[in-house]
Every structure is written in structure tokens, then in C-alpha cells.
Image: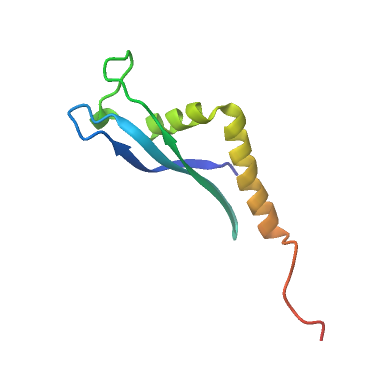
Amino acid sequence: MAVTWSITNTEYNNDSDKGVVRADWSASEVDGDHTGTVSGTESFTPDASAAGYKAYASLTEANIRAWVKATLGSEEVTRVEAKVAAQITKSKTPPTAWGVPW
């Protein structure tokens, strides 16, 4: 299985450029009945005059997902994915259980 990164919402400037200033994201994985999810928010400073600037209407989830991962950096992306995996492991082998011995 692999961690799936999703963009759950964006905030953008309410002007003609509509530059994205914030993206809410989640990273999750499902393994049978076990799920791990980590979420967060990243901020951006859009510059419509910059080379490579994409108009809001042309943006895809993949574009913004790439921005989020670039902003986080590869080490933090690895940590996020490790947290997701740890949640699944803990769900499969919980440290405590409920019940009575009789």
C-alpha cells in the first residue's frame, strides 16, 4: 500500500489572479480495516508575475499537492508518511485491550 496525498481545500486571493494562499491537505492509507491519516495546512505567497505561474482555473490537485510536498520538504514528507504507517500498525496491534478475565 502507499500513502495517498489529497488536497481537501484551498484559500485564494479574491482578485483577478486568484493566487492560492493556503492549501489544506491530508495523507492517508487504508490497510483492510485499518486506516492512518495525517492532515495539515500549508501557506503560499503567490506571484502572478513569476515564471511558471499557473492561473487558478488551470490548477489541478496534482499541482497543489506538489507545492505542499515541496513546502514540507522531503524529510517532513517521509515523517508524515511514517506517522500514517505508525497509526496503522498501532491499530493492528493496540497497546491495550478491553475485557474481563472471566
Whether residue 16 sits left or right of residue 26 in the image: it is left
Residue drawn at point x = 77 percent, y = 82 percent: 100
Whether residue 51 sits left or right of residue 81 in the image: it is left
Residue at the right extreme?
101
Residue at the left extreme?
16
Which sits in the foreground, 65 or 31?
65
Q: How is the image coloured?
A: rainbow
Q: Position of residue 87 (x, y in %)?
A: 64, 52
Quadrant assignment for the N terminus: top right
**Does the rendering let one see residue 60?**
no
Which sits in the foreground, 81 or 29?
81
Q: Position of residue 34 (x, y in %)?
A: 61, 57
Quadrant for residue 33, please give it: bottom right
**Does the rendering let one see residue 66?**
yes
Q: Position of residue 102 (x, y in %)?
A: 81, 86
Quadrant for residue 47, please give it: top left
Q: Give the vertical position of 44 relative to 95 (above or below).
A: above
Whether residue 15 sits left or right of residue 62 in the image: it is left
Residue at the bottom extreme?
102
Residue drawn at point x = 52 percent, y = 31 percent: 72
Q: Position of residue 41 (x, y in %)?
A: 44, 40
Residue drawn at point x = 33 percent, y = 16 percent: 52
